């Protein structure tokens, strides 16, 4: 039976291959190497120009393009090396022992070092995600294997000619680039990154020697006393006023990062780091403080996802000079040689590879000169680098400076229907595409930064109360404003609190500003933070404390849908679909799955009419369903009733509750998750987390004091 099945499969495959005539298959065979080499070059161009954009852009299409290019680049270059080796082996076999290669075969063998260059990748992206850094051993093996294949091709194609000599130079450049990438991946792996920050072992003051002297003095009959000397630490924030120039601010950010990068690998900090950082940030205004944090996170991105840490070192500059010199030398010497026996196509591709290699190296140098690392080096050694300003490219932003906004009611009502929505729901049943469709981005407003900064600064004034400050999720604000009756909404699970307050905030906002939804400043900040926190709950729940946020979100959606199915008026499109008119039915089904014509204003009015304050919803529904729809309505009613006379005070309180929730979420998020978000344009949550650490609001300051200082008195 197996023989029969195998024969049938062979017959079917033979029939498929016979669909293409031999001439077309031969054409494919002759062009496969050219296509792969050109595709490999195209992928390198995409990586070098788009690799830096994801640092400051939140566009999904940029991440998709980079992801595809990153995964394909290594595969295409590896396969192309295999094709070159296979073609070269066939030529050698056909010529017999001692046969000479023709000019075209030797020229295609010359492409192998360029593919090594491509495997090394550009400086702007070495890892797509943190997980790629953990695969550095795999890349080390790849370095050995691919270099061995290129060396084998070089040996097969060797003959005493100028092209073989040029192959040696390109082989050196390609090996250097591939080794740079492997070293960068290894340095950015969690283990190596952590080991680079572990300080030398510190045995502390010599206790045995001290006790020996103490016992000796007692034995000699002296009256000995030990007095502990309190170590007085003074920290002055030199040049930390609001006049701090950008160059010095960059220097200060790098100095701070040498200690605070430990947070990304869950290492602890000492009291000295905390006090020096607090003294600095208490002297800064909000803009300078956030800019320092922005610079620090920019350095972290470069260390984890690019070759910056290597190429800005002394050995990195030497290696870059060697590879660049080799590439330029090869281009110059190759241009002066005679290639009359070579194919025009092969010769054109060779020139394209060499010119592209030189251009990409020049772009890499210009990007290097335009980076914060170069500014930092000039600031430390040569002062203000104005004389190289004409060589600089436009420096990209250090992060996107934007926050995502996700509105639950818009998503539940589907008031922003997608084209081919029904088809997309069948392909992506987990609603990922729909959630992305309802996510929008807005710039982080200075008022929002000011609100966050002032809150953290006031909380850090009493450093002995850190545990309470970072564990509060809104209760401290409610107590301060005298509304302890609302504490039930922040004493439940954190994901539950987010969803309850999100619904309540929106209902109150629509009630207070029905015609002009601009609202007061505190109102707009509250809505912005509310929708940002819900975005984290829906799209990145791993950044929040462990919970069942998506279950609550979906259960709330189900209760929302049932509520409007029972109590809202039927939409015109639904009525038309249920009628016998075939044209009305088609019109309904082409409505992209939109449920009804109930807009958000009407939905809010209907939800506010529900009397949810008389009886708690959980007493009626039980705990099986995790929906919090009417808990949100209940909180909205209490907010409206308790603070109906002072609208401004109400929104000030709501905004500060959201800031406290934001700070709590930031403090509970692991450092590696903050590092992951740097490749997606950065998150406001990460900036808040690092700013809290600079104010001392973190549990990772576990060294409460330095070395003890005691003095032995003898009488």
Image (cartoon, rainbow, N blue to C red):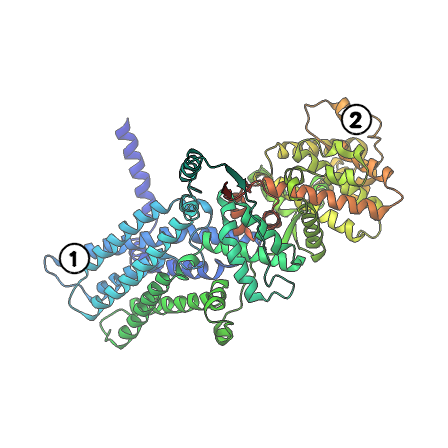
Mark 2 secondary-structure assignment: loop
Is residue 586 visible in the rendered image? The answer is no
- Which is more toward the observer, 269 or 341? 269
Residue 569 position within the rendered picture, expressed as x and y whole percent measured from the top left = 82, 36
Q: Evaluate whether residue 35 shows in this view.
A: yes
Q: Tell me residue 615's x, y (percent).
A: 82, 25
**Residue 616, numbered circle:** 2
Nearer to me, 646 or 26:
646
581 or 692, which is in the foreground? 692
Residue under numbered circle 1? 92
Q: Residue at x 27, y 69 (%)?
A: 343
Q: In this view, does 650 lie to the left or right of 269?
A: right
**Corner quadrant of residue 547:** top right
Q: Is mark 1 on a helix, strand or loop?
A: helix
Quarter of the image that includes the N terminus: top left
Is 260 situated left or right of 619 in this image? left
């Amino acid at each position: 039976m197996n023989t029969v099945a195998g024969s049938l499969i062979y017959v079917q495959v033979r029939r498929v291959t016979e669909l293409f005539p031999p001439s077309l298959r031969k054409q494919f065979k002759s062009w496969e190497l050219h296509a792969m080499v050109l595709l490999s070059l195209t992928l390198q161009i995409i990586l070098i120009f788009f690799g830096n954009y994801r640092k400051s852009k939140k566009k999904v299409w940029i991440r998709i393009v980079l992801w595809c290019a990153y995964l394909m680049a290594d595969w295409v270059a590896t396969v192309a090396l295999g094709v070159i080796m296979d073609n070269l082996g066939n030529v050698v076999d056909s010529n017999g022992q001692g046969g000479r290669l023709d000019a075209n075969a030797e020229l295609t063998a010359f492409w192998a070092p360029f593919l090594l260059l491509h495997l090394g990748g550009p400086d702007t992206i070495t890892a797509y995600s943190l997980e790629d850094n953990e695969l550095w051993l795999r890349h080390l093996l790849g370095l050995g294997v691919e270099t061995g294949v290129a060396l084998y091709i070089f040996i097969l194609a060797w003959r005493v000619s100028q092209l073989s000599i040029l192959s040696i130079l390109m082989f050196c450049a390609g090996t250097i680039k591939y080794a740079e990438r492997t070293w960068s991946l290894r340095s950015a792996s969690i283990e190596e990154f952590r080991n680079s920050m572990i300080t030398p072992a510190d045995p502390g003051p010599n206790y045995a020697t001290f006790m020996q002297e103490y016992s000796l003095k007692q034995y000699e009959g002296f009256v000995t006393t030990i007095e502990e000397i309190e170590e007085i630490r003074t920290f002055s924030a030199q040049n930390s006023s609001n006049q701090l120039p950008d160059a010095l601010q960059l220097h200060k950010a790098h100095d701070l990062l040498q200690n605070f990068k430990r947070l990304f690998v869950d290492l602890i900090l000492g009291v000295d780091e905390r006090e020096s950082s607090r003294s600095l940030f208490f002297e800064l205004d909000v803009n300078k403080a956030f800019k320092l944090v922005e610079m620090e996170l920019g350095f972290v991105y470069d260390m984890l996802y690019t070759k910056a840490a290597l190429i800005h070192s002394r050995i990195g500059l030497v290696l870059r000079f060697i590879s660049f010199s080799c590439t330029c030398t090869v281009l110059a010497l190759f241009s002066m040689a005679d290639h009359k026996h070579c194919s025009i196509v092969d010769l054109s591709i060779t020139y394209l590879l060499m010119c592209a290699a030189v251009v990409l190296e020049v772009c890499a140098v210009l990007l290097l000169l335009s980076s914060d690392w170069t500014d930092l080096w000039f600031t430390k050694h040569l002062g203000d680098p104005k004389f190289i300003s004409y060589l600089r490219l436009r420096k990209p932003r250090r992060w996107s400076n934007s926050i995502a906004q996700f509105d639950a009611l818009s998503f539940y009502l589907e008031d922003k229907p997608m084209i081919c929505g029904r088809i997309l729901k069948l392909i992506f049943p987990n609603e990922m595409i729909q959630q992305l469709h309802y996510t929008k981005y807005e710039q982080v407003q200075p008022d929002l930064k000011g609100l966050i900064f002032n809150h953290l600064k006031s909380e850090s004034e009493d450093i002995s109360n850190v545990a309470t400050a970072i564990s509060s999720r809104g209760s401290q604000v409610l107590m301060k404003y005298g509304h302890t009756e609302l504490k039930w909404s922040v004493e439940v699970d954190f994901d539950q609190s987010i969803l309850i307050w999100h619904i309540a905030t929106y209902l109150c906002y629509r009630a207070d500003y029905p015609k002009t939804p601009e609202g007061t400043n505190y109102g707009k900040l509250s809505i912005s933070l509310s929708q940002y926190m819900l975005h984290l709950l829906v799209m990145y729940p791993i950044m929040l404390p462990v919970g069942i946020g998506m279950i609550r979100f979906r259960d709330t959606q189900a209760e929302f849908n049932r509520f409007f199915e029972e109590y809202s008026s039927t939409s015109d499109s639904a009525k038309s679909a249920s009628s016998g008119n075939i044209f009305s039915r088609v019109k309904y089904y082409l409505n992209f799955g939109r449920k009804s014509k109930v807009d958000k204003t009407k939905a809010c009015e209907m939800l506010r009419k529900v009397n949810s304050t008389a009886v708690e919803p959980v007493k009626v529904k039980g705990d099986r369903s995790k929906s919090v729809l009417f808990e949100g309505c209940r909180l909205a009613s209490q907010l409206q009733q308790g603070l109906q006379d002072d609208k401004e005070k109400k929104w000030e309180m709501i905004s500060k509750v959201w800031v406290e929730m934001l700070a709590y979420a930031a403090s509970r998020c692991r450092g590696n998750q903050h590092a992951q978000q740097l490749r997606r344009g950065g998150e406001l949550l990460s900036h808040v987390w690092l700013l809290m650490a600079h104010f001392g609001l973190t549990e990772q300051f576990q060294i409460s004091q330095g070395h003890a200082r005691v003095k032995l008195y003898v009488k």
